[in-house]
Image (cartoon, rainbow, N blue to C red):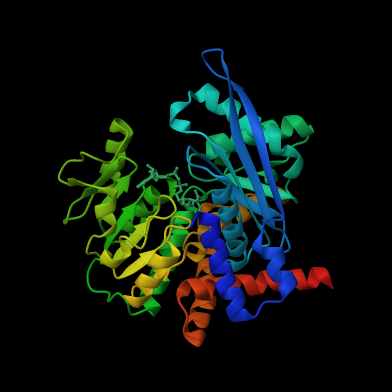
Amino acid sequence: MNPFEIAQKQFDDVAEIMKLDREIYSTLREPKRFLEVKIPVKMDNGKVRIFTGYRVQHNDSRGPFKGGIRFHQDVTPEEVKALAMWMTWKCAVVGIPFGGSKGGVIVNPKELSKAELEKLSRGYIRAIHMIIGADVDVPAPDVGTNAEIMAWMLDEYEKITGKKAPAVITGKPVERFGSKGRDLATSRGGLFVLERALKNMRAVKRKGALTVVVQGFGNVGYGFAKLAYKAGFKVVAVSDSKGGIYSENGIDIDAVTEHKKKTGSVINFENSRNITNEEILELDVDVLVPAALEKQITEQNAGRIKAKLVLELANGPTTIEADEILLKKNIPVIPDILANSGGVAVSYFEWLQNRRKKYWEEEKVNRKLEKLMKNAFDGIYKVYKEKGVSMRKAADIVAVQKVAEAIREEMM
Ligand code: NAD
């Protein structure tokens, strides 16, 4: 199954449980709009290369479309469609007034010079500017993009429209109208959810430092490892696209960050041994945190997962078959649309600050984030208990219910 088929199957399952009206089901099963664009970029060698990009808008019944932009060589239309649908559910779960969208460009950003990357980022905005806007569709960073790229994109949008419009894009640098706390928001939100899950769910008994492994050491994985380490968890393994490292005594996250800056990867770090990205998922630990890409826990390896709880910081890291295997093994999965919704929550705070032209201290951002994440967890946990379904189904039920209500209002 490709990621969109997975997203549709998850939706079909909850639509069935909820006996969702036919019209609402059809409205939500496909995106509202799918745009494919070609982006010509004059490369440093003087030759023009044409890149392919997408913007998918899934649903905007609860508010403007909202979703990140991915720069990755494996981007496909199906992946972007799945990510857009999951954004609709995520914004509903965390209770912010947005719908769901996503963007992607087929490119390995590591192979581009900074000048080429800037031209591509600006070219992408020129290609999609007519369907985005602070009240229409609000992009943000995702895999392969960052705050600097958001600043280039905002600048390009403002040049095209001739107006200042900081709220058109979130995840910007703080000095370019970004929000304090946005860089670590996805990871911090995940940690709030994990703490709440550990308090309520008996899957993991709290005794001493709990062991954690994190797959992916980018914005989200690195941020989570850092915050978890500071909060007293023992992070015994981390990985990136080149491989992973393991130390039963725990890894010093600040030191490994320095090592990655120097060498380009976490591998070959002192006082640890190198392991593969397959091995990292199967370690005998308390909490497994996939924070890289989709389809990492599959029917091939789910049977060998030994963690007591899975916290999905990546989008779509678990396949449908793997989900069933983990359910049978009594390993709770805290689903992506809840676990990683802290990023979009603080993106909402950034959008609000831009519109009100008033900026908050980081302490206020984190406090408000904590409240949103706890409320989101509690709402889903209630459905999980009442209906006896998995946390993923409970989250999907909560989300689809909210979006369906908004569509019903629209149709009246
Ligand atoms: P990023 O580009 O900053 O980092 C991705 C990391 O994953 C890199 O360290 C890369 O080396 C690693 N990686 C890639 N392939 C891998 C593999 N096969 N095994 C192990 N590691 C691998 O991206 P990010 O923003 O940290 O996003 C990570 C995940 O979190 C994605 O699924 C994304 O959609 C999701 N997410 C991101 C945000 C956000 O605010 N950035 C919000 C919600 C969800």
| Residue sitting nearer the eye, 322 or 88 | 322
Q: Residue furthest front?
A: 1
**Residue 54 in picture, x, y percent from top left:** 63, 42
**Residue 314 in picture, x, y percent from top left:** 44, 55
Could you tell me which residue is drawn at 28 percent across and 43 percent down?
A: 243
Q: Is residue 392 visible?
A: yes
Q: Is residue 374 left or right of residue 23?
A: left
- In the displayed structure, 396 sits above or below 73; it is below
Give the quadrant of residue 119: top right
Q: Is residue 69 left or right of residue 405?
A: left
Could you tell me which residue is drawn at 32 percent across and 60 percent down?
A: 300
Q: Residue furthest bottom?
A: 386
**Residue 182 in picture, x, y percent from top left:** 52, 50
Count all numbered tags in the image, as a single digit.
0
- In the displayed structure, 272 sits above or below 231; it is above
Could you tell me which residue is drawn at 53 percent across and 48 percent down?
A: 180
- In the displayed structure, 108 sits above or below 58; it is above
Which quarter of the rendering shows the C terminus? Answer: bottom right
| Residue sitting nearer the eye, 308 or 56 | 56
